[in-house]
Image (tube, grey):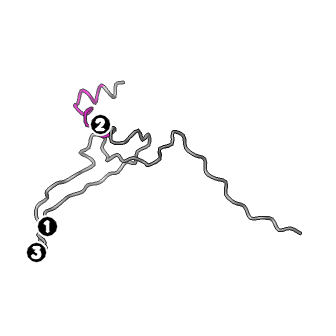
């Protein structure tokens, strides 16, 4: 509960809630770290212009970009048993 109070006090709670709402109930999201920069490109000359937009995971409320894991199961499915080599008959 103190974590929620700290997030609310720092103003981070709305951002965290926005990130979590995009996960669609995923309980084990994939955490991506890094950055992406979009530049303006002159297609005639090939010159790369100034940055138009930059996304850095360190600037996100959770410190990472959270992405759904894609597994919608509530409990993990146990792995299937490995096939064994048939024993030769004598």
Separation of marks 1 and 2 at Cα, in angstroms = 33 Å
Separation of marks 2 and 3 at Cα, in angstroms = 42 Å
Quadrant into which the N terminus falls: top left
Quadrant into which the C terminus falls: bottom right
Residue 58 vs residue 32, the one in the foreground: 32
For disc 3, the neighbor class at 10 Å (few under 14, some 14 to 19, many from 20) is: few
Mark number, residue 27: none
Boundaries of the magenta span: 5-19
Secondary structure, mark 2, is helix
Q: Is residue 66 left or right of residue 43?
A: right
Q: Which residue is mark 3?
A: 44
Q: Is residue 20 left or right of residue 71?
A: left
- Name the spot of residue 46 as percent of width and height, x first: 13, 73
Nearest to N terminus: mark 2 or mark 3: 2
Residue 78 vs residue 50, the one in the foreground: 78
For disc 1, the neighbor class at 10 Å (few under 14, some 14 to 19, many from 20) is: few
Q: Are marks 1 and 2 in contact (CB under 8 Å)?
A: no
Mark number, residue 16: 2
- Name the spot of residue 33 as percent of width and height, x first: 32, 51
Q: Which residue is mark 1?
A: 41
Residue at 11%, 69% in the rendered image = 42
């Amino acid at each position: 509960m103190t974590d929620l109070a700290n997030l609310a006090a720092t103003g981070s709670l709305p951002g965290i809630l926005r990130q979590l709402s995009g996960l669609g109930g995923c309980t084990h999201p994939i955490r991506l770290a890094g950055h992406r920069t979009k530049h303006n490109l002159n297609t005639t000359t090939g010159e790369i212009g100034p940055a138009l937009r930059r996304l850095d995971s360190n600037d996100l409320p959770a410190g990472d970009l959270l992405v759904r894991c894609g597994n919608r199961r509530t409990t993990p499915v146990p792995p299937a048993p490995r096939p064994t080599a048939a024993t030769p008959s004598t």
